[in-house]
Image (cartoon, grey):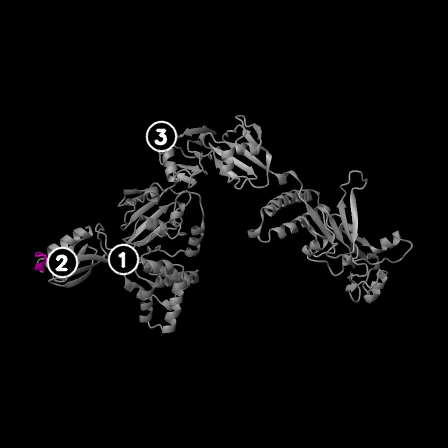
């Protein structure tokens, strides 16, 4: 027990040697042994120094005076720069003094608090995770209303006809002791009033003051330290030392900010056991009013109590979340705190869910009630979006140059709307267009018309109404798209758009040419049979491209299907794999169509001593895995066609743009169909070899196939 007490005393002594909590002046830091300060202690030390107006550069001077070498000074400087507090200290050497007792893992706990997120309005203000740090600034002129007290260090400049300089500290009795002037009591006076008292004493010696030839200036060089207690709903309640320039906001910030249960509307400041101010942070957040952000004095008590009334407001305002409401505040007040209605909100009424007799009740509040409808704790406010209803919308679709949405004007006709849409495209079907009109019961009426007669005015003009949809048809919408398909041993198989005078050689070149194993001796071309009396649905042509010449080249027609066959004399290598308990497992080329499993086993060096013959299996692809489904093939073909057409969108013709649009529609339908019908079962088959042998009693061996695996 004695040993534990000894260790504890030594630890406390170490803390107080590096962290003098009662530091009142710069000279106190000269007792710090900088070479032995840990990182966490260094961070707290920087906070304390900055609270008294000193930077890390001032501390480096003290360290140099202690005899640290240049290399040690440089190392200490790097530690200062890496300390988490240094960003605040370098920018503004006035961070409030930290707690008067060292808490274990203080910095780690603060980081946890700082990172918490909340939807409570104003909660983030004192969290320290923004650039808002509520630091007082010692570089500003001394405020005239600053009240002097014991510990304030004053700088008194006399200049003009006579010159002199005094530096004095207010004594515990409240006096300034100036040489040849005796004590001058200034405690409890503002800087302005203390200046008047000083001048009344100084002018007895400096007579030029009366003649406006000598002037006096007084400023607070180093403010006194005050001890403040912070209790209630803050993350780190306790006793703190601050410079007297600091305020209530500084204190709350240093205490880690508020908890989620804290009030932001009634933070109380007690002085000499009396309530001297009630701080409402909402005034600061909404109006920039800092009148209640009073300066702290010694032994002040800040009480952050729990909230009294809290309501929530969802989407529909610019700052949704939870808000603290004072008794008597209304819907208008809440909307003001929440930044007002958002652009797409329905502002004529809101809906409030309120607790009545332990049950929820819906209350509709209209805009003329906002100013006097009082809110209660627990209210949930919901705001609807504006109704998607247009007063004068028209829509143009189809074969015009600028399809889209337009505004309806008085006595507007179909002809007027077509002109607004920059006119008709060349592919317009002039015999028929139609207007889709929405009735009051949301049913629709179709109004057909002759486009040409409306344009030239030879027919009665059709007047438009709001939400009318004008449909102008393209002649291309009335007929199927013309394609040509090429497949087989071709580099870019797929579907290609048909053009007049397209011949066989052209389409082969467009498709990237034939593969190495292709034959041009027998190209098969299937064509739709358009003969009325023919019993066959298609015609089939076989073309030897080597015999074609420029005069007799084979001309293609819409929907021709071209197949480039494989040369039967060219055979690609096929492989099989053998794995498991053989001497030489791996990949083997199939040497002939007659090669069997037993032959492959011999090439692999035969089974080793651990082989289990009964467990030998063969894995081979089924016929279903050799080719994709027909739907997938169509998807691939259309995708390749679209890629060809859209390679350079800047040079697309109108017909190509129209074709791409139709391809996209077809692809969407095919992909949907493919997703619903896809079945991957039976793509791979795995069997025991001995079972296959039993089924085939004629043979004890099995021929090899492409891409098989044996193990």
Q: CA distance from mark 1 to mark 3?
A: 47 Å
- Region in magenta: 206-212
Instruction: Name the image quarter holding residue 400.
Output: top right
Neighbours of disc 2 within 10 Å: few (<14), some (14-19), many (20+): some
**Mark 3: few, some, or many residues within 10 Å (few <14, many ≥20)?**
few
Q: Upstream in the sequence, badge 1 or badge 2? A: 1
- Nearest to N terminus: mark 3 or mark 2: 2
- Pointer 1: what residue? 139
Residue 674 in the image: above or below residue 49: above
Q: In the picture provided, is 57 more to the left or to the right than 671?
A: left
Find out whether residue 210 is within the magenta segment: yes
* Front residue of this view, candidates 322 and 183: 322
Q: Check if mark 1's residue and mark 3's residue have beta carbons within 8 Å.
A: no
**In the image, farthest residue toward the top:** 441
Q: Is residue 388 visible?
A: no
The span from disc 3 to disc 2 (Cα, nearest Å) is 58 Å
The reply to whether the magenta stretch includes residue 617 is no
For the C terminus, the image quarter is bottom right
CA distance for labels 1 and 2? 22 Å
Identify the element where label 3 is drawn. Answer: loop
Residue drawn at point x = 39 percent, y = 43 percent: 262
Instruction: Where is residue 514? Give x, y as percent.
Output: 72, 58
Q: Secondary structure at mark 1?
A: loop
Q: Which residue is mark 2?
A: 215
Residue 79 is tagged as none
Give residue 372's mark: 3
Q: Earlier in the sequence, mark 1 or mark 3?
A: 1
**Quadrant of the rendered structure where residue 4 is?**
bottom left
Residue 673 appears in the picture as rendered: yes
């Amino acid at each position: 027990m004695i040993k534990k007490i000894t260790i504890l005393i030594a630890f406390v002594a170490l803390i107080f040697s590096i962290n003098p909590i009662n530091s009142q002046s710069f000279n106190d830091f000269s007792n710090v042994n900088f070479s032995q300060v840990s990182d966490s202690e260094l961070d707290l030390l920087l906070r304390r120094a900055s609270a008294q107006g000193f930077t890390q550069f001032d501390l480096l001077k003290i360290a140099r005076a202690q005899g640290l070498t240049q290399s040690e000074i440089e190392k200490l400087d790097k530690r200062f720069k890496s300390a988490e507090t240094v960003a605040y200290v370098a920018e503004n050497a006035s961070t409030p003094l930290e707690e008067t007792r060292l808490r274990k893992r203080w910095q780690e706990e603060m980081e946890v608090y700082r990172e918490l997120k909340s939807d409570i309005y104003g909660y983030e203000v004192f969290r320290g995770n923004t650039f808002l740090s509520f630091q007082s600034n010692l570089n500003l002129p001394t405020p005239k209303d600053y009240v002097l007290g014991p510990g304030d260090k004053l700088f008194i400049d006399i200049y003009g006809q006579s010159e002199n300089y005094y530096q004095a500290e207010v004594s515990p009795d409240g006096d300034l002791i100036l040489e040849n002037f005796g004590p001058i009591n200034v405690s409890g006076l503002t800087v302005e009033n203390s200046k008047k008292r000083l001048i009344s004493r100084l002018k007895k010696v400096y007579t030029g003051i009366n003649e406006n030839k000598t002037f006096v200036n007084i400023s607070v060089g180093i403010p006194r330290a005050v001890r403040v207690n912070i209790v209630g709903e803050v993350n780190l309640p306790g006793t703190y030392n601050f410079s007297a320039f600091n305020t209530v906001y500084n204190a709350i910030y240093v205490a880690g900010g508020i908890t989620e249960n804290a009030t932001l509307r009634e933070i109380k400041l007690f002085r000499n056991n009396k309530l001297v101010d009630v701080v409402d942070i909402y005034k600061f957040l909404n109006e920039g009013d800092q009148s209640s952000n009073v300066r702290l004095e010694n032994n002040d008590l800040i009480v952050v109590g729990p909230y009294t009334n809290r309501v929530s407001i969802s989407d529909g305002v610019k700052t949704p979340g939870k808000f603290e409401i004072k008794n008597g505040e209304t819907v208008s007040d809440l909307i003001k705190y929440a930044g007002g209605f958002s652009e797409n909100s329905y502002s004529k009424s809101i809906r409030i869910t309120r607790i009545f007799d332990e049950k929820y009740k819906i209350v509709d509040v209209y805009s003329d009630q906002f100013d006097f409808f009082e809110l209660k704790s627990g209210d949930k406010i919901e705001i609807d979006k504006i109704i998607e209803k247009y007063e004068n919308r028209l829509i143009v679709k189809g074969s015009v140059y600028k399809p889209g949405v337009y505004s309806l004007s008085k006595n507007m006709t179909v002809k007027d709307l077509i002109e607004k849409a920059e006119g008709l495209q060349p592919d317009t079907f002039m015999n028929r267009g139609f207007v889709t009109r929405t009735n009051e019961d949301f049913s629709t009426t179709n109004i057909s018309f002759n486009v040409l007669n409306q344009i030239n005015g030879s027919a009665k003009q059709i007047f438009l109404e709001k939400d009318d949809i004008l449909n102008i048809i393209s002649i291309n919408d009335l007929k199927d798209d013309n394609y040509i398909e090429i497949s087989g041993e071709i580099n870019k198989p797929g579907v290609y758009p048909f053009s007049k005078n397209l011949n066989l050689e052209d389409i082969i070149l467009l498709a990237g040419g034939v593969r190495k194993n292709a034959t041009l001796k027998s190209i098969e071309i299937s064509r739709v049979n358009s003969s009325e009396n023919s019993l066959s649905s298609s015609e089939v042509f076989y073309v030897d491209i080597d015999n074609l010449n420029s005069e007799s080249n084979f001309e293609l027609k819409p929907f021709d299907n071209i197949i480039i066959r494989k040369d039967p004399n060219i055979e690609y290598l096929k492989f099989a794999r053998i794995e498991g308990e053989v001497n030489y497992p791996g990949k083997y080329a199939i040497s002939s169509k007659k090669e069997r499993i037993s032959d492959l086993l011999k090439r692999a060096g035969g089974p080793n001593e651990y082989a289990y013959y009964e467990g030998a299996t063969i894995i081979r692809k089924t016929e279903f895995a050799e080719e994709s489904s027909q739907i997938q093939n169509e998807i691939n073909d259309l995708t390749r066609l679209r890629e060809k057409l859209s390679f350079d969108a800047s040079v697309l013709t109108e017909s190509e743009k129209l074709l791409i649009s139709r391809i996209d529609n077809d692809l969407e339908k095919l992909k949907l169909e493919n997703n619903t019908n896809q079945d991957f079962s039976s793509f791979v088959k795995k069997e025991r070899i001995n079972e296959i042998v039993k089924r085939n009693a004629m043979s004890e061996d099995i021929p090899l196939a492409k891409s098989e695996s044996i193990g």
